[in-house]
Amino acid sequence: MDKEIRLTSAGVALQATLQAPPSARGVVVFAHGSGSSRFSPRNRQVAEGLHAAGLATVLLDLLTPEEAEEDRRTSQWRFPIPLLGQRLTGAVDGLQAAEIGMAALPVGVFGASTGAAAALITASERPDTIRALVSRGGRVDLAYQALPRVRCPTLLIVGELDREVLALNRQAIRSLSAPHRLAIVSGATHLFAEPGALEAVTALATDWFGAHLSPDPIVFHPPLWRSRQEAGAALAARLQACHWPQGQTVLLALPRGGVPVGAEVARRLGLPLATWCVRKVADPSWPELAIGAVAAGGVVVWRNGEGRARQQGWLQEEERELARRQALFGDPDPQRLQGRHLVVIDDGIATGMTVRAALLSLRQLQPASLTLAVPVVDREVAAELAPLVNRLEALALVENLRAVGQWYEDFSQLSDRDVVALLGESPPFSV
C-alpha cells in the first residue's frame, strides 16, 4: 500500500510516496525527470517490478508543488541540476533518519532523464550509503563532474533510437570508474513507449538492484569487465581524478596480465608505461600454489616463511626467468625511478604475494610516492598491502577473492609477443 511521506532536505519539505513490501531487503529512491512527478506511470511500473522482488521504493518529488508549477509554466530548467542533486542527497539522508523502518536497509537510486543526473550527484556524495544506481534515459552529461567519484555499481539504460542520449551515455562511461554496464533496449525511444520497452527496463533494473542491494556491505557479481582493456578504461577514469605530475609519473605494469590494463590507462592519461617484472615461486607438485615471489633488488617473499632451504632450487629457476623477462620487456633502470611518482598496475590481486614483492622492491628506490591501482582485489589483502603504498585505488573490493579470472569474460593468457606489442603502442618511459 502506498504511504505518502515528507522528507526534509536543506530546509525544504519534499513530497514522496513510500511502498514497502513485507520484509523488504532494500529500498530504491526514484528521481524523475523535468516536467514529470512522483506519479509518473513509467516510474511506477518499474517500482512495481521492484516490489515483486522484495524491494521498497520511494518515489520522490525534488521540487515543491509551487516550484513544479512555476517550472511547468515557464517551460525552462529554472532549478539547476546541482540543486536537485543536493535535494536528493538530503532526502536520502532524511530517509535513513526518518521513523519509517528504512534506516537499516541498503539504498539504491533510480534516476530518469534529468533525475539521473541528480542520482549520480547523490551517489558521488554518499558513496558509503548508495549501493547501486540505475539510470533510465539519463542525461548523465549534466552530472559530468560527478561521474569519476561514483563508487557504486551503475546501470545505464538507454533506448536504441534515443540516439542523442545514447551518444551522451557512451561518452559518460569513459569517466565512470565504478563497475558499470550500458544496456541498450532495442527499438526504444526516449520514453520507452514502444511495446515491451518499459518491461525490459523493469527487468534490467530489478535484476541490477536485486543483485547489488544486499545486507553484505560490498557485493559484486562477476564478471564485471569483458576484457582487461575494459577494466583498464574504468581504472583510468578513477585515476583521472588524481593529480599526476607530468614528467615525474611512471606507470609500472606487472607482466603479463597487468600490461593490457596499464596500456589502456597510459593511453587515456597520456602517462609513460613500463614494466616491473616479478615472478611467482610455485610448488612443482602444485603449479597453481604460490609459495613465494621474487622481484628486482633481491626481494624475496615466502608464504609463511616456511621451508626456505627446500625452496631454494625453485627460487633460482624463477630468478633466471625474472632476468629473462626484465631484458625482454625492458624494465627501467631502478636508479631512473628514484624520486618519481610510481603507479603499480595489475589486472587483479587474490593472494597479493607477487604484488607485495613488487612493492617492497620499489620502496627500496625511495620514490616520491607509490600508488597501487587494480581493478579488483581481495578485501583482506588490500588491508595488508595498504601500509606499503601512499595510495591504493581499486574498483572492486571482494570478500574471499579466489580467482581474478572470474571477474573477466575474456581472461586469455598473454604471450611475450603480446606484451612487447602493447608496450610498443604505449607512451614510453624516458628521462
Image (tube, grey):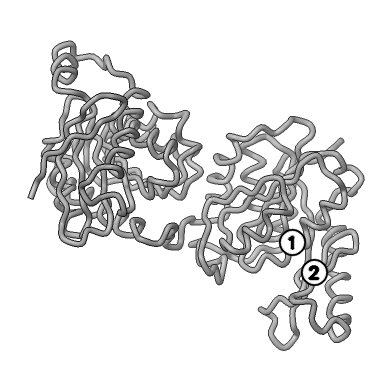
Residue at the far top in the pictured view: 74
- 145 shown above or below 324: above
Residue neighbourhood size for the residue with mark 2, other residues' Cα within 10 Å, grouped as few (<14), some (14–19), many (≥20): some
Disc on the earlier residue, 1 or 2:
2
- 224 shown above or below 340: below
Which residue in the protein does label 2 denote?
Answer: 301
Answer left or right for 114 relative to 217.
left
Image location of residue 55, percent across then percent down = 22, 55
Image location of residue 37, percent across then percent down = 15, 31
Answer left or right for 316 relative to 280.
right
Which of these two is toward me, 317 or 124? 124
Name the kind of residue labelled 2 in the image.
Val
Image location of residue 61, percent across then percent down = 20, 31
Q: Residue at x 71, y 67 (%)?
A: 353
Which residue in the protein does label 1 denote?
Answer: 356
Circle 2 — which element?
strand
Which of these two is toward me, 379 or 325? 379
Q: Are marks 1 and 2 in contact (CB under 8 Å)?
A: yes
Circle 1 — which element?
helix
